[in-house]
Image (cartoon, helix red, strand yellow):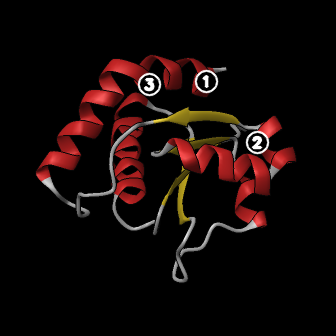
């Protein structure tokens, strides 16, 4: 039985960047046969808050702002020590479904993390 790699996407509200990235990676992963699960959370969200349970759940956390990295290291030091962390520097100015956001994420996926995910998910 294959164990899925758990990918956690975290942005301010868990609604735009993280959701779009999780959707995009899920689509790509389906075409590549990746065994992955994705979840999203927002550091400042009441609807999809980042919780200790989500941090414990994830294998890899994707962040969109450097200050979020420092915040997570402060709040969840054990989880951040255990997890792999990927920073995708995209500002919080795009809505979910925005063509510009989709394009930025697609370019980042192809340039920076497609090979990484191929290696991690395959191992």
Q: Residues within 10 Å of mark 2 (few under 14, many from 20)?
A: many
Tag 2 residue? 80
Q: Looking at the rendering, which quadrant does residue 69 occupy?
A: top right
Q: In this rendered view, identify the residue nearer to me: 122 or 110.
A: 110
Residue receiving disc 1:
120
Choose mark 1 or mark 2, whichever is in front. Answer: 2
Judge the density around disc 1: few (<14), some (14-19), many (≥20) Cα neighbours within 10 Å. few
Instruction: Please tell me whether residue 40 is drawn above or below residue 68 in the rendered image.
Output: below
User: Which element carries disc 3, helix, strand or loop?
Assistant: helix
- Other residues around mark 3 within 10 Å, as few (<14) / some (14–19) / many (≥20): some
For numbered disc 2, what is the local secondary structure? helix
Please provide percent x and percent y for residue 116.
51, 20
Instruction: Name which quarter of the figure residue 49 lies in.
Output: bottom right
Q: Residue at x 81, y 37 (%)?
A: 82
Identify which residue is drawn at 51% across, 82% down.
Answer: 47
Whether residue 81 is visible, yes or no, is: yes
Nearer to the camera, 91 or 39: 91
Tag on residue 113? 3
Query: Which x, y percent locates residue 105?
Result: 29, 39
Q: Is residue 44 left or right of residue 19?
A: right
């Amino acid at each position: 039985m294959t164990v899925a790699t758990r990918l956690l996407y975290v942005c301010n509200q868990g609604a735009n960047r993280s959701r779009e990235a999780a959707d995009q990676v899920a689509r790509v992963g389906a075409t590549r046969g990746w065994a992955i699960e994705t979840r999203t959370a927002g550091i400042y969200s009441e609807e999809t808050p980042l919780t200790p349970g989500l941090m414990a759940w994830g294998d890899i956390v994707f962040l969109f702002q450097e200050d979020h990295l420092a915040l997570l290291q402060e709040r969840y030091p054990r989880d951040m020590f255990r997890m792999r962390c990927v920073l995708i520097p995209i500002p919080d100015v795009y809505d979910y479904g925005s063509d510009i956001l989709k394009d930025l994420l697609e370019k980042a996926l192809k340039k920076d993390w497609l090979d990484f995910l191929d290696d991690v998910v395959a191992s």
